[in-house]
Image: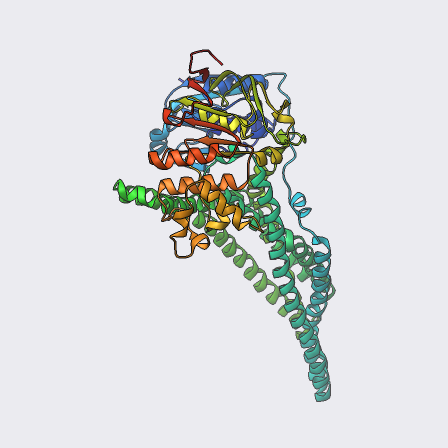
Amino acid sequence: MFSLFQHRKPGKTPLIRQHEFTECGLACVAMVMGHYEHHVSISQLRRELSVSAEAGTSMAELLQLAEGKGMDGRVLQGDVKELQNVQLPLIAFWRGNHFVVIVKADSRAITVHDPACGVRRYSYREAAKLFSGFVLELKPRPEFKKKNPDDRLTLGHLAHKTAGLFQRQALLFALSIFTLITMLASPSYVQLIMDEAISRSDSDLVILLTAIFAIVFIFEVIGRFLKQLLEIFMRNIAYDDLSQSIRGYMLRTQAHWFQSRPPGIVLAIEKSLHACADFISNGYVQLIYSGLIALTSLIFMLFYNVEIALLTLLMMGVFFIIRFSLIGPYQRAVDDSIERTAQYESLLVETQKGIITLKANNMERARDAVMDKSMREHIAALMRKERLLARFDVASLLVINAEQLLVVCLGAWLILEGQMSIGMLYAYISYKRYFSDAMVQVAQKLLDKNALKGPLDRVGDLLFSPTEASQFGKTLVTSPVSIHFDNVSFAWPGHDNLLHNITMTINAGEELTIIGQSGSGKTTLLRLISGMLQPTDGELNINKTPINECDLSSLRQHVRIVHADDILFTGSILENIACFDSNPDRERVIEACRMAEVHHVIERLQHGYDTALVPGNSFFSAGETQRLVLARALYGQPKLLLCDEVTANLDKTTAQRVLANLRSLGIGLVFVTHSPEVIDSRGRCYVMERGRLRDMEGTPS
């Protein structure tokens, strides 16, 4: 039975999206704390609680985290219908593997903030199928303090990454002012024709006014055309600058950042950048421009008639009330549509990549069902956004048409009373139309700006994540390369140690073999040496320098790692082996392929080293692909080569030739393998068992 805590008057529960697969619990704690006006980011909670990449967090761990933040709580069990009688929000266990925050429960349905998919409303019948029966109820203790939100990524931060933006905005603003002047002069044409030329029967004045305003209209058309061209140019330049900057940062981010997030995250960030670039390039200028149109039009309207102008202002006030009532729902709809679109597109890419596996296992129908569900969610998200805009358009049209009827009616009454001429009414209606259109644009731009909160959070999650280089120093790694492990241990967050107290030395030019079963920690050991992972305990030295003080780029220049599942990229064979060097050394490429025993395979191809590769549709066998990957590592002329199952897909004869070639290079070699055939009598051999290293004679290392 759920209990009822008497909380202080609650605020609004924020919606916080999870960034990683398993941090839904952290997002829920952040939402509940935000409800009580202590705003904290997921990244901050992530630093305080290590989340298992496999199992996520438990309610007990979330309770412990909340207690450390000044909250009391307890885990309760009950039925979904009892939620109507308790104080919300609550953290609920959902679908047996997920956490959500229940923010509202009425007689018909419940509303939840789902960190994975946003705001959702379920009937009690639907919720009963999802609710796992347990909730975490939290309340603030007396010492619980309010906290303002941390600094978030803003459009201003992104604008600084766009060179020359201010100058282009100034030019766009100047063109906007020019078109504004010509546009505001237009209504005077009809008024002068009707009230001056026609009333005097002056045909010469008609011709003169027509000629003058024809020139004005031509300048207006030219100004608008140049303005549109500049907007297109600015939008694409801003997108290019932002994309280059963010893409470069993304490639420098730690590999774990990608591994712990959905496969469509890059697509979602790219779409978010496009939306941000569009607003940065001309959104603010358009906002100011529309504001100026509205202000100047209002001045002209007041000049013609104050009463009608006040009526127009009143109706536009109603319009803005309707418009801004949609801010929250529209923001969530835009964010959800970006997320769902990215998920669907990532499924398409994943399906293309795994088409052989799908066909081999007769999984086409099952996969189609998964994609169909994702596509429907994608379409539903787009429809939610479009329905909101449709509601706004209908409401806006209703208000504006009602205002038009009232203005014309009141204007006609004033004409009959002799207080206004027909030309003045026509001019007023023209300025009123400018005013209304400008206010609609202002409202739309403000709505667009507010809707960028979700995309900015998504980009900010990347930009506020540490890069690989930030975990390392500036000491250059020089040749020859020696490695020393001093009581090194490693564990993934939320897990027990994967490596235990490894002590080992790899001298320059030495060969070493590590044999062990899958999951024993062999590959993890190699990734520690290559700097892809950092020890959790102990010290790993490169040339007697702690690895976290070494320069990462120079480390990887001298130390290369080859995995059994490494891939080739779109491009020619030459480009792949030369690591897409802008000036590849063809002779070095050929020599690397000879050492990897793959040169003769490439030579048989019609286009040789210029043959184009398409990832996922390679005409190379697994063994040939593995040798191409090895050749790519050898092209860099490393001083220490780390080989992870490098002969796994090779026949015995080819494997022996490859190993002999590698040993002839005189560089340091570290092999990890299941097969004892790799062992050479001249090198040392270790056995890895459950994260512990011992030599073949049985002495622990």
Q: Quadrant of residue 399?
A: bottom right
> What percent of the width, then of the height, locates residue 216?
70, 75
Furthest-top residue in view? 699
Quarter of the image holding residue 219? bottom right
Color theme of the render: rainbow
> In this rendering, is residue 250 above or below 423?
above
* Image location (x, y in percent) of residue 247: 57, 45
**Picture quarter containing residue 295?**
bottom right
> Looking at the rendering, in which quadrant would you find the N terminus?
top left
Q: Nearer the viewer, residue 287 or 170?
A: 170
> How many dots with numbers?
0
Q: Is residue 380 left or right of residue 543?
A: left
Name the residue furthest left.
362
Q: Residue at x 50, y 52 (%)?
A: 389
Residue 523 on image: x %, y %: 46, 27
Name the residue nearer the viewer: 370 or 6.
Answer: 370
Say whether residue 342 is visible: yes
What residue sits 43% from the left and 33% below the top? 660
Name the residue at 49% across, 14% down. 701
Q: Nearer the viewer, residue 637 or 429?
A: 637
The residue closer to the viewer here, 506 or 340, is 506
Residue 115 can be seen, yes or no: no
- Residue 505 image offset from top left, x and y in percent: 55, 20
